[in-house]
Amino acid sequence: MKKRMNTLRRVLTGALFFALLLGTLAAVSRVVERKASRTRFEPFLSEPEDIDVLFIGDSLVVNGVFPMELWQDYGIAAYNLASYGNTLPVTYWTLMNALEAASPRLVVVGVKDVEKSYKLSGSSSDVHTALDCYPLSLTKLRAVNDLMDDPYAVDDSGVRYADMKGEYLFTLGKYHSRWSELSTSDFGGYALNRQKGAETGTGVADARDYDLIDEGQAAEEGGWGYVYLRRILGECADRGMEVLLVHLPYIASEEEQMAANAVRYIAEEYGVGYIDFVSQDDTVDYAVDCMDARAHLNASGARKVTDYLGRYIAEHYDVEDRRGQAGWLDWDEDMAVYARDKDDLLRSQSSLESELMLLHDDDYSAYVLVRDAQALCGSDKLRTLMHNIVREHVYEEDMFSKWANAIFPLERLEAAGAQPYALLAERSEGTFTELVGDELNGGAALSFGELALDADVQGVCVTLTQGDGRESAAQGADVAVLVVRASTGEVVAAKGFALTETEE
């Protein structure tokens, strides 16, 4: 009996030691790991039951869909779980890990690169970002084993993924060398993503043109993307979740368009919705809505796509408007933080192109004064960005057209010549006013103050005087931009720019 007790004691002691060792390793791993995954997705894992709509996919979805804008305009409680470099196999396992905690009503799947024949992209860090946030579980073990089952698959540095399985389950193996880089943020003070997983692009790139092909030109299914897309559809059907497939805007090759056309037939087979923004081609303007040459969307493009999706989801799916409901009141607090971050983004821009691009936002009223309209119009991009400030969003289902940049609502900008020109844009009200030359002298009376517009050879100045005596001024040699939050009348940015830095 005593011998049995000693044996049992040794077993329990060993088990306790092993458990403590695992706990210690897990704690150390969490401290040293790169925080890209946790900053993006920890807010989702803290309250997964709040989420009615999940967005999954690759970088196009990360930069192209703003859940906080869906909340503000439609009351849709959504989270963006997409990640840079995700293939559809990684997207599938992202969903499977997320469904360990969440039960969304609708899953929106980005389908770019469905034709790819590999399971993993070349960046092992991207795979870490997609998976590190999820706790160790049988599902995560299955994900790692499945994604890394090809003995010949290597990352950008030539290391075999099959040899890296352990570091995705216990991240200490990947990040143990970060000891010298640790800061206080690694011990729990890191800043969490405030955009429900999305990230905002502020660049304004020159995206190249491309030719649209007929929707009937479809590729034959082949490659892992199609396999895992069907697995996503099957899994969601088994769980009673609706699915919407989206092919977000980008500069798509003929091969990529043919693959996207094949997805249309898969969507019809499963009876799910499908929006191909590439073939519709009337939602964004590639001349001003891209942050890089490959056409990842900037904030202007993302707002257009997000608004389209918000209207589409509200019309086609049983997703509640959660605004004002007891369980979602903290989303209004999140919205207030998100709004402050947008204000900070406007204040921080040093590029006139980026500043004008960010003004395509219903939350702001914008007052732009240009000393010489002809000089500004010498840059096609700046001229188009001025029009873009007041462009309305296009929402036409199943449109097949080219191009979205045919909308040029300003009537007097190009005709102003070398005279001063002012645009007073009230996006929240859907109105704008154009003033040219001597018309600036009278200024303008606004609901929240008096606007003075001054332009001479020394430069331009926009001054807002409010009822409580506050005075805010934007001054610049060539262009002055004053931005007001439409709901409060608060001045959030007052800046000046020189055209010589941005002319083409």
Image (tube, rainbow, N blue to C red):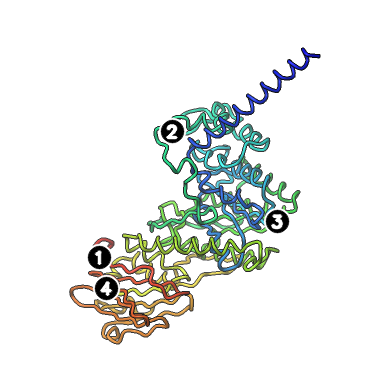
- Labels 1 and 3 touching (C-beta < 8 A): no
Dot 3: element? strand
Q: Judge the density around disc 2: few (<14), some (14-19), many (≥20) Cα neighbours within 10 Å.
A: few
Q: Is residue 478 left or right of residue 25?
A: left
What numbered label is drawn on residue 178? 2
- Please state which amino acid type lies under the numbered disc 4: Gln
Q: Earlier in the sequence, mark 3 or mark 2?
A: 2
- Labels 2 and 1 touching (C-beta < 8 A): no
Q: Residue at x 52, y 48 (%)?
A: 40
- Please state which amino acid type lies under the numbered disc 1: Ala
Q: Earlier in the sequence, mark 4 or mark 2?
A: 2
Alpha carbons under labels 4 and 1: distance apart: 14 Å
| Residue 143 position within the rendered picture, expressed as x and y whole percent measured from the top left | 63, 36
Query: Image height check: is 103 above or below 283?
Result: above
Alpha carbons under labels 4 and 2: distance apart: 54 Å
- Please state which amino acid type lies under the numbered disc 2: Arg
Which residue position is annotated with label 4? 374
| Residue 221 position within the rendered picture, expressed as x and y whole percent measured from the top left | 64, 44
Which residue position is annotated with label 3? 242
Which residue position is annotated with label 1? 498
Query: Image height check: is 329 above or below 421?
Result: above
